[in-house]
Amino acid sequence: MPLPPRTLALFISDLHLQPSHPATSAAFFAFLKDRAMAAESLYLLGDLFEYWAGDDDLETLHPQLVARAIRAVSDAGVKVYWIGGNRDFLVNTGFAEAAGLTLLAEPHVADIGGHRIALVHGDAQCTDDVKYLQFRAQVRTPQWQQQFLSMPLSRRKEIIAGLREGSREAQSGKTYEIMDVTPQAIDELFASTGADVIIHGHTHRPAVHQYGARKRYVLPDWDLDAEVPRGGWIAIDSDGAIVRHNLDGQVI
Ligand code: MN
């Protein structure tokens, strides 16, 4: 009997972890223990947190528990990588150290299982949302971040709550995750990276899209506290297979 293929890499995104969704956090902790421990590497591709006000929020229990749980995985020898999302782009070296993970700039290109893979969160590819892209460009400047992070943590949390409220109102109850990536942005990402596979999240539209010989995998968001629980991950096995898994680990 040949050995079953090993898991080279796992990819997840959009868990939107927050204390008010305890079942989602519990599922994430179980995923880390049961799945990530057996993989060579784990890629967190953005919006792991519902929001991130700054690394000094690690004083708070919930973010601390999340960092500690990821730390247990990296301490076990699994390489853990992070790409920030539109909600947790402020994660920085303080969190990276606490969680034992490596921060990546996007797009990140990784060679895994014979594939050349471009990794992004996905928000920057939603190029029809001009207003959001302007906001994104602004909040990613060192000046903006310095100024924001110089405010007291409680004030930053208030501002973030206001932004989330505003984005809900502006889009009649929908968050900006409702926007989708554009074909142009995807073409450009394939061209600029030379990748044959793109993996991203953000849009909450789990799927696999084929472009000739190339493929784009979209990760699901997680919500175990919803009436119909959802979530899942993508694995790349040592035989080169790229496999989508549902919450129960079943192949879909
Ligand atoms: Mn997102």
Image (spheres, grey):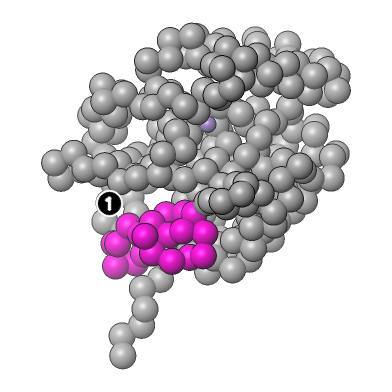
Amino acid on which disc 1 is placed: His
Residue nearest the observer in this picture, 144 or 244? 244
Q: Which residues are magenta?
A: 232-252
Image spot of residue 238 (x, y percent)? 34, 67
Q: Is residue 249 magenta?
A: yes
Image spot of residue 128 (x, y percent)? 37, 15
Report whether 188 appears left or right of 203: left
Q: Secondary structure at mark 1?
A: strand
Residue nearest the observer in this picture, 167 or 111? 167
Q: Which residue is mark 1?
A: 115
In the image, residue 206 sits, relative to residue 238, either above or below, namely above
Q: Quadrant of residue 187?
A: top left
In the image, residue 248 sits, relative to residue 4, either above or below, namely above
Q: Residue furthest left?
A: 212
Confirm whether residue 41 shows in the render.
Answer: no
Instruction: Identify the image quadrant of the C terminus.
Output: bottom left
Image spot of residue 233 (x, y percent)? 47, 54
Q: Is residue 20 magenta?
A: no
Query: At 37% across and 17% down in the image, what residue appears?
Result: 127
Residue nearest the observer in this picture, 29 or 38? 29
Q: Quadrant of residue 184?
A: top left
Report whether 196 appears left or right of 151: left
Q: Residue furthest front?
A: 227
Image spot of residue 251 (x, y percent)? 38, 64
Instruction: Identify the image quadrant of the N terminus.
Output: bottom left
Residue nearest the observer in this picture, 80 or 222? 222
In the image, residue 36 sits, relative to residue 64, either above or below, namely below
